[in-house]
Image (tube, rainbow, N blue to C red):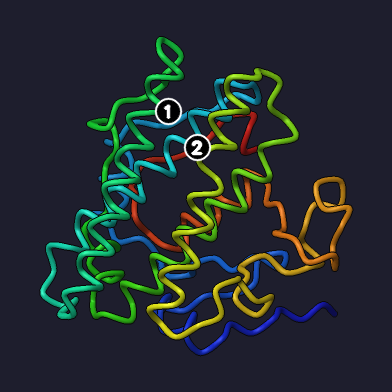
Amino acid sequence: MKTTKALSGSRRSLLKWGLCGFGGLMIATLPETANAQRRRRRSKTLTFNADDAGILNFALLLEELEAAFYAAAVETSDITDSKELEYLSVLGAQEAAHVTFLRSVLGEQVLFETADLSFNQDGLEALLSDRDTILNTAVTLEDVGVHAYNGAGPSLTNPTYLLAAGSIVSVEARHAGGVRALLGKPTTEPDSDRLVDDDSLDADLNPFKGKAYDELYTPRQIVEILGSLGIINNSIDGALVA
């Protein structure tokens, strides 16, 4: 029987409500409260088709979540080091710039507005509970962004969209490395920190496993990770994430 890889201590602290294996992918097992279920029913369903517009709108969603997280993080009283606070403020501003940039690239192909996103306040507050949790969450979001952009790259056919995604993914990687440095961690993601294990990686997307590169995640895997973080109430569906 297949066993699920254990989370590292720091990652267990980050996702402290408990995670379990789901085909090798770590997802939250905490049941939704009645209020959470009602909020999910009331919030807009985000539907992403398996085409260029769907892929870049999915990237936009990730940028929106990062921007919202950093905006909330700098408002807490848990980041007491002025340099760390300034660093998170800069990252937040850059993520907000990514949102603006992707919306401008997508133009009339934008599928949702920022106001359509329904944030789960309980989930967000859990990720903002203390300094280490905030920084570890930042690392997770940035690492997931890198895996997501790299995973989407091979499917993009619009050269403008591909250029837009490629110009952002390198920034996401630098963000992750910078926050890892604040935590005293290696600047690149070790396998022990990945939320998708080797057995669950899509073989077609990852022909170079073991060659010192960032693994590529599928949109469905990204959605499962977002679900484990509990940041938004919106349901996510569509052919892209099926």
Residue at image coords 55%, 49%: 170
Residue at image coords 77%, 58%: 201
Q: How far apart are marks 1 and 2 (CA)?
A: 8 Å
Furthest residue in direction bottom, as rendered: 9
Amino acid on which the number 1 mark rests in the picture:
Leu
Residue at image coords 63%, 70%: 194
Q: In the displayed structure, does residue 205 sit left or right of residue 14? A: right
| CB-based contact (under 8 Å), mark 1 and mark 2 | yes
Amino acid on which the number 2 mark rests in the picture:
Ala
> Percent position (x, y) of residue 221?
63, 52
Sequence-earlier tag: 1 or 2:
2
Q: Nearer the viewer, residue 96 or 110?
A: 96
Furthest residue in direction top, as rendered: 108
| Quadrant including the N terminus | bottom right
Asked where in the image residue 75 lies, by quadrant, the reply is bottom left
> Percent position (x, y) of residue 72?
19, 58
Query: Which element type, helix, strand or loop, lies under badge 1?
Result: helix
> Percent position (x, y) of residue 159?
65, 19
Q: In the displayed structure, does residue 18 sit left or right of residue 127? A: right
Q: In the displayed structure, does residue 21 sit left or right of residue 60? A: right
The residue carrying pointer 2 sits among few (fewer than 14), some (14 to 19) or many (20 or more) residues within 10 Å by Cα, namely: many
Q: Which of 105 and 231 is in front in this view?
A: 105
| Mark 2 lies on residue | 59
Residue at image coords 32%, 29%: 100
| Mark 1 lies on residue | 102
Residue 212 visible to an observer of this rendering: yes
The residue carrying pointer 1 sits among few (fewer than 14), some (14 to 19) or many (20 or more) residues within 10 Å by Cα, namely: many
Figure check: 14 above or below 114: below
Figure check: 65 above or below 3: above
Mark number displayed over residue 164: none
How many numbered marks, from 0 up?
Answer: 2
> Percent position (x, y) of residue 219?
62, 43
